[in-house]
Image: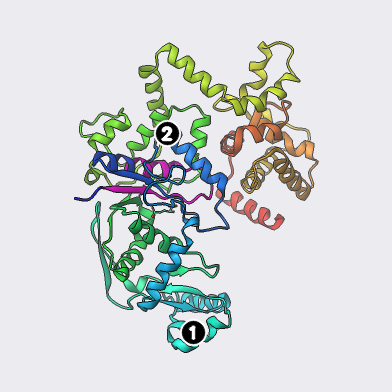
Amino acid sequence: MSEIRTRIAPSPTGDPHVGTAYIALFNRCFAHNRKGKFILRIEDTDQTRSTGQSEQDILAALRWLGLDWDEGPDMGGDYGPYRQSERSAIYSNHIETLLQKEKAFHCFCSSERLDKVRLQQMEAKQQPGYDGHCLALSKEAVQEKLDAGEKHVIRMKIPDSGECVFTDLLRGEVHINWEQIDMQVLIKSDGLPTYHFANVVDDHLMAITHVIRGEEWINSVPKHVLLYEYFEWEPPVFCHMPLLRNPDKSKLSKRKNPTSINYYRAMGYLPQALVNYLGMMGWTMPTGVEKFSMDEMTNALSLERISLGGPIFDIEKLDWLNGKYIREDLSDEEFIAEFANWAFQSEKVEAIVPLLKQRVERFSDVVSLGQFFISAGVQVSVESFQHKSLDKDACLKILQFSLWHLESVGNWQRDSIEGKLQELANSLEIKIRDFLFPLFVAVTGKAVSISVIESISIIGLDITRARIRSAMAVLGGISKKVAKNLEKEYKQLS
Ligand code: GLU
């Protein structure tokens, strides 16, 4: 049998997500269990959302977890380039093939027309999707439009009846009606491929044998298998992993649980414990042991034994496991080394020291002044938020609005954070000093401390979010109804 090849294909559009690490782990363990290769491919065809910074962060986070790869954009390999933005010529050649085979077609419909069609379909309670308007164009008409430089996309043809049947390793045969499948855009009007097209072409050209990915992609498989059929390629084995869930069973989201790998790193989890925990999502070792290394998982993994019940990402359980690793695996010397490594990460310390130096008289002051930079959280009570002109509801509103506003800071630097918060204070017509008060308390635990904006820029969005959220809980939280009203008010502001 040919070499087993698996891949993780992150889109570099945000923080490195624990879900990416979870999928990477299963791909890596499976490939290495079969003496195959694990590949990292960057899917950055969405040029408006992809950033080089996010790519670097994802690579660094995966590497921190020990989830390194055999081929990838940073190290090359026989099947490169491994970054989709460098593979444009490949997609252009391949779309030509599909056009020639008449499996794909040019579509010149305006977005206004598409919106109108969609609206009509929704009103008629039909499945929304492209209505095939441009399929009726003659070859000559298409050529004329192309010669005139008319804006267009390229879509794939879809059978108009019958069903697509494919096999998923964990679910067996899956049936999906073609009527439910849209005539997917393969090449966008900017000439770049969509996820579906680039993903299939690359999986084939990179000789991927097993596509192991999150269950959210299962409804896309019909488009993918159809593309394999159009190209006359053999499709890979599909295995859709169960989605990670919050303790309330909803899909894991940063609104309820920190999802960035950077958060877990900043909070002082051991990478091997986090990897072990992710390995427990949907998988149990044949022996039933809960603590196992990546090598042990690699030796034991069989995909068939993955369970489809939604695995819960529960921080309390992770804490328990991490504590077990600290107690059982670290000698005192190793503990000191690991702790120092974590606490004195050079970048963070370099940012904190100038702030502390101005304010301390003795080294022993450093701990009380600076502890909020590294502690898991801060101790606050309702009384901590007492203020001459802001009541509890005003504090809650400022915290919630600030959180929403901070989410939209693109470049996480002191000045942009300050600009954002100032802008919010202005629109709320609250003096900046008063406005910052609840944030000060939530983030630093005190009403007066090191500049809160400086502090937020150092501890990062994930920890800031966690602190704001826990402060809101201390203040009694907000009901769904109040949240809805606040959201409305916030939208009007921006
Ligand atoms: N780029 C996709 C993602 O970000 C990859 C999905 C897949 O593995 O096919 O999840």
With 405 as the anchor, is 291 left or right in this view? Answer: left
Residue occupied by mark 1: 142
Residue drawn where x is 46% and y is 58% of the image? 87
**Separation of disc 2 and disc 1 at Cα?**
51 Å
User: Is residue 187 on the magenta stretch?
Assistant: no
Q: Label 1, secondary structure: give it.
A: helix
Q: Nearer the viewer, mark 2 or mark 1?
A: 1
Q: Which mark is residue 466?
A: none
Disc 1 residue type (three-letter):
Val
Q: Which mark is residue 65?
A: 2
Vertical relation: 115 (above or below) 443: below
Residue 128 seen in render:
no
Q: Position of residue 38 (x, y in %)?
A: 34, 44
Quarter of the image where one finds residue 324: top left
Vertical relation: 321 (above or below) 178: above
Nearest to the observer: residue 348 or residue 75: 75
User: Is residue 6 on the magenta stretch?
Assistant: yes
Which range is magenta? 4-26
Nearest to the observer: residue 255 or residue 455: 455
Residue drawn where x is 31% and y is 27% of the image? 291
Disc 2 residue type (three-letter):
Leu
Quadrant in which the C terminus appears? bottom right
